[in-house]
Amino acid sequence: MTPPQRRRRQPLPEPPPPPPQPVQQPPQEGEGKNPERLYIITGADGERAPVDLVTLIVACAEPPSSATPEQTAVLRMCGAPLSVAEVSAYLGLPFSVVTVLLTEMLAAELVQARAPIVRQQLPDRSLLEAVMHGLQRL
């Protein structure tokens, strides 16, 4: 008995090259986001309260039933004082949008804005030395 003969395959024709894909550039800052959503959050007027990044926000009330999801999130977050920069970061929204959102909440008295707590300067060295010498004499 003779072994089966192997048949040589014909090489397959090469497939045509794929069409060139357009080169996609990385999105620039501000691109790829949904600007319509930010407009819906801020509303048509877009007024802003005089708050800056370090202004502390504290919730004064429970979220009303008419509150937007962003307002509800701010009220739940701000049980303890948070800076506007932290609120902006936690919500993932730009600072300008958060200031408009907080302006509406301040007008409705849902939150309070407080000045940041500033550390006092170190006391005068001569005063500290006088206290130290007084304690040593005791």
Image (cartoon, rainbow, N blue to C red):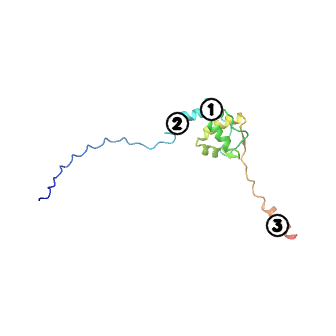
Classify residue 23 by image quadrant.
Answer: top left
Q: Quadrant of the N terminus?
A: bottom left
**Distance from Cα at disc 1 to Cα at disc 2:** 17 Å
Going by the picture, which residue comes out furthest to the left? 1
Q: Nearer the viewer, mark 1 or mark 3?
A: 1
Going by the picture, which residue comes out furthest to the bottom? 137
Q: Position of residue 27 (x, y in %)?
A: 47, 42
The earlier-in-sequence mark between 1 and 3 is 1
Looking at the rendered structure, the secondary structure element under dot 3 is: helix
The earlier-in-sequence mark between 2 and 3 is 2
Looking at the rendered structure, the secondary structure element under dot 2 is: loop
Left or right of residue 106, residue 30 in this image: left
**Distance from Cα at disc 2 to Cα at disc 3:** 62 Å
Residue drawn at 81 percent across, 61 percent down: 127
Q: Nearer the viewer, mark 2 or mark 3?
A: 2
Residue drawn at 65 percent across, 39 percent down: 72
Classify residue 107 by image quadrant.
Answer: top right
| Disc assigned to residue 132 | 3
Residue type of the residue flagged with mark 1: Gly
Going by the picture, which residue comes out furthest to the right? 138
Bin the neighbour count of mark 2 within 10 Å (Cα to Cα): few under 14, some 14-19, many 20 and up. Answer: few
Q: In the rendered image, which residue does mark 2 sit on?
A: 34
Q: Quadrant of the C terminus?
A: bottom right
The earlier-in-sequence mark between 1 and 2 is 2
